[in-house]
Image: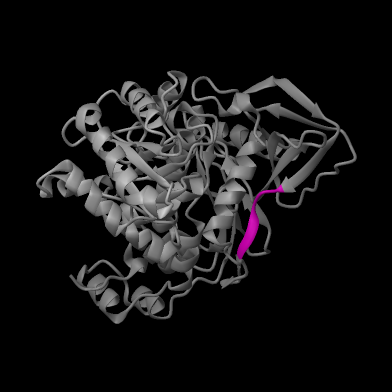
Amino acid sequence: MKEWNQSMLCDFYELTMSNGYLKNGFYKKITYFDVFYRTVPDGGGFAIAAGLEQIIEYIKQLHFSEEDIAYLRSKNMFDEEFLDYLKNFRFTGDIYAVPEGTPVFPHEPILTVKAPAIEAQLIETYLLLAINHQSLIATKANRIVRAAQGKPVLEFGSRRAQGADGALIGARAAYIGGCEGTACTLADEMYKVPAGGTMAHSWVQMFDSEYEAFETYCRMYPQNTTLLVDTYNTLKSGVPNAIRAFKEVLLPQGITDFAIRLDSGDISYLSKKARKMLDEAGLTQCKIVASNSLDEYLIRDLMMQGAEIDIFGVGERMITAKSAPVFGGVYKLTAVENDRGEIIPKIKVSENTGKITNPHFKKVYRYYDRESGKALADELCLYNETVDENMPHTVFDPNATWKTKTLTEFTARELLVPIFKNGECIYKSPKLKDIRKYCAEQVELLWDEVKRFENPHTYYVDLSEKLWNVKRELLTKSKIK
C-alpha cells in the first residue's frame, strides 16, 4: 500500500461542504468551533484530555498532493476552482486547547478552532479522531491506575488493540493516564514510554523442563528477571522452580531484584500462597506481578481481598477501553464573524437537551480553593470576560440552577492555552513524562468524591451570567424560527 497523506483522513462531507463554501463565498468567513464531549466514559466523574501532540503534528503537515487532487477530480463532484484552492492549502487559523493530561468535564471546550470556514471544516475528522481515542484510553488508564492505589500498572495491550495505531498511540495515552510502562517496543522508540517484558508460556514450553527454562532465563537476563509460573502448575512446580532458579543463579551474584508473574487462575488466592512460599524461602524481596484480563473493578476487588500483588499488567480492557469503547467527543460551530469582524454566536438546538450547544467564542476558568488547592468548579465565559480573584464569585449548576456556590477564597486559571496563531505553532509540547506528571498532579487536585468509580459527585461546570444570557436569547429566537 502506498504511503498516505493524513490530510485526506477526513470524512468525505468535509470536502463537499468545503467545495460549497468556496462556491458560495463563505471560504474566507472566520468561524469558531469547539471540541467537547457529553458523557464521561464508564459513568465516571471526569475524563483526561489527550491527543494534542498528534494534532499539532497533523496541522503542521496539512497539504494536498497532486495525487490527492487527481483522486478528488476523478470523483466528478468538485469545482476546478476548489481543486486549485487545495493545491496551496495550509492552515492559517488559531487553535486553543487544554494541555494534555488535564482533567476535563462534559460540555466544556477541550479545544477551540478559530479559522476560515474551509480550514476549520477540513480538520474536524482528525481532531476528533485524535482527541476521542487518546482521551478515552488515558481516562481508562487513569481509572485503573487509581484502583491500584500506588502500585505500578503496566500496559500490555498491543496484541488486542484496534490496529497498529491503536496499539502505539494507545500506549502513549495509557502512559499519560498513569501507567508506568508498556509492552509495546515501538512506543518506547517513538515516544519514550518505558518498554519491558519477560517471557511467554512458549518460552517455558520450549525447554525439556520448567526449571531449565527458568534457569536459562535468569542467566541470560539477570538484571531483568520475571518468571511466568503458571504454565503447568503454579504452586506445585512454577513457584518452587522459580525459587530454585533465583537461589541458584541470581542470589550468588548478589541480585535481589526479581519477580514472578501470575497470568491465570484465582489471582488473589495464588498470590497469597505464592507470597508465603517466597517468604518462607527467604525471598521476601521478590515481587509478584499479576495479569490476565484485569480492569479497575477486578484490581479494586483484589486490593480489597488483600491479594499479595506488587505490579499489575493490564491489556485488552485498557487498550480498547472495553467497558466503554467510545469517547463521544464532538465538533460544533459556536460562532462566525460578519464582514465587520463582529463575532456572531451560533447555537445548535435539539429536543434532546443534552445536545444543545454552548454558543460563542469562549474561555474556560477553573477555580481552586486557596487553602486546600482543590478544584471547586469550572466556568465557561465569553472570550473577553475576566475574573477578579479578590471578589466573591457565584457559580451554579446549569442542570439545576437553584444549586449555587459562592466562592470567596479562590484562585482562577484559564484552561485553554494558545497552540496555533495565524497558522504558526506557538506552543512547545512538554515531554511525555512531564505530561504524565502533570496529569497525576491535576487529578490529585480533584475531590475524592469526584473520583469515585460509581455515582461520583457532579463537578460544577457553570456558564457565566453573560454567556448564559447569550444562550437564553438564542434559544428564545430559535423558538420563533
Quick check: 22 left or right of 460? left
Magenta-colored span: 414-419
Q: Residue furthest right?
A: 390
Instruction: Report the residue at 54% width, 39% height from top.
Output: 357
Instruction: Report the residue at 53% width, 68% height from top.
Output: 28
> Which quarter of the rendered picture does the N terminus lie within?
bottom left
Magenta-drawn stretch contains 81: no
Vertical side of 379 occupied by 433: above or below: below
Figure quadrant of residue 392: top right
Is residue 457 visible in the rendered structure shown here?
yes
Instruction: Report the residue at 31% width, 25% height from top.
Output: 270
Magenta-drawn stretch contains 416: yes
Q: Position of residue 184 (x, y in %)?
A: 33, 55
Q: Nearer the viewer, residue 447 or 481?
A: 447
Q: Position of residue 378 (x, y in %)?
A: 68, 37
Q: Position of residue 423 (x, y in %)?
A: 56, 72
